Image: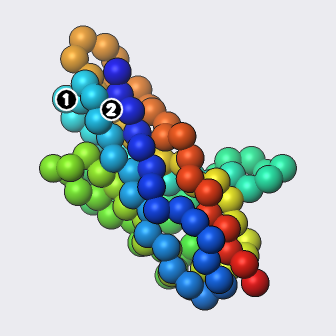
Amino acid sequence: QVQLVESGGGLVQAGGSLRLSCAASGSIVSIGAMGWYRQAPEKQRELVASITSIGRTNYADSVKGRFIISRANAKNTVYLQMNSLKPEDTAVYYCNAEVWSPGIPHRGYWGQGTQVTVSS
């Protein structure tokens, strides 16, 4: 079994910064792509940023130039540095990881989500 645990959400004023972390643990052989998604009330979950195992990144247009995704492979952890936050960034943020475990096909796992609220 694999668990993803997020941390770092909270309440911040517009223009402020937050750093999210997501650590994977459990029966892990290797981790492929990792990413951050978000879901605002009454909206669909959307990709915010992703990073491959070799560090290639991809960002939603709405966060380019403000958010930075990174990972520490030795710690099975992915980070999201969020700068110049806007009220429209308010959402529950979820991390996702593609994980290879012994004896089973690789699959994606989700964290439980962490709330980010940006006040105007």
Circle 2: is it few (<14), some (14-19), or many (20+) Cα within 10 Å? Answer: many
Can residue 69 be seen by looking at this rendering?
Answer: yes
Residue at 25% from the left image edge and 46% from the top image edge? 76
Residue 26: percent from left, percent from top: 28, 29
Q: Residue furthest front?
A: 11
Q: Which residue is mark 2?
A: 99
Query: Please, what secondary structure does the residue beneath circle 1 have?
Result: loop
Q: Nearer the viewer, residue 57 or 26?
A: 26
Give coordinates of residue 68: x percent, y percent.
Answer: 42, 72
Q: How many marks?
A: 2
Q: Which residue is disc 1 drawn over?
A: 29
| Residue 115 place in picture, x, y as percent | 62, 57
Rendered image quadrant of residue 3:
top left
The correct choice, above or below, for 65 with respect to 7 in the image is below
Q: Is any atom of residue 60 visible in this view?
A: no
Residue at position x 68%, y 74% in the image:
118
Left or right of 67 on screen, residue 93: right
> Marks 1 and 2: CB-CB under 8 Å?
yes
Q: Secondary structure at mark 2?
A: strand
Q: Position of residue 100 (x, y in %)?
A: 28, 27
User: Mark 1: which amino acid?
Assistant: Val
- Point out the image quarter for the N terminus: top left
Q: Is residue 41 above or below residue 101?
A: below
**In the rendered structure, which amino acid carries the disc numbered 2?**
Val
Q: Is residue 111 above or below residue 18?
A: above
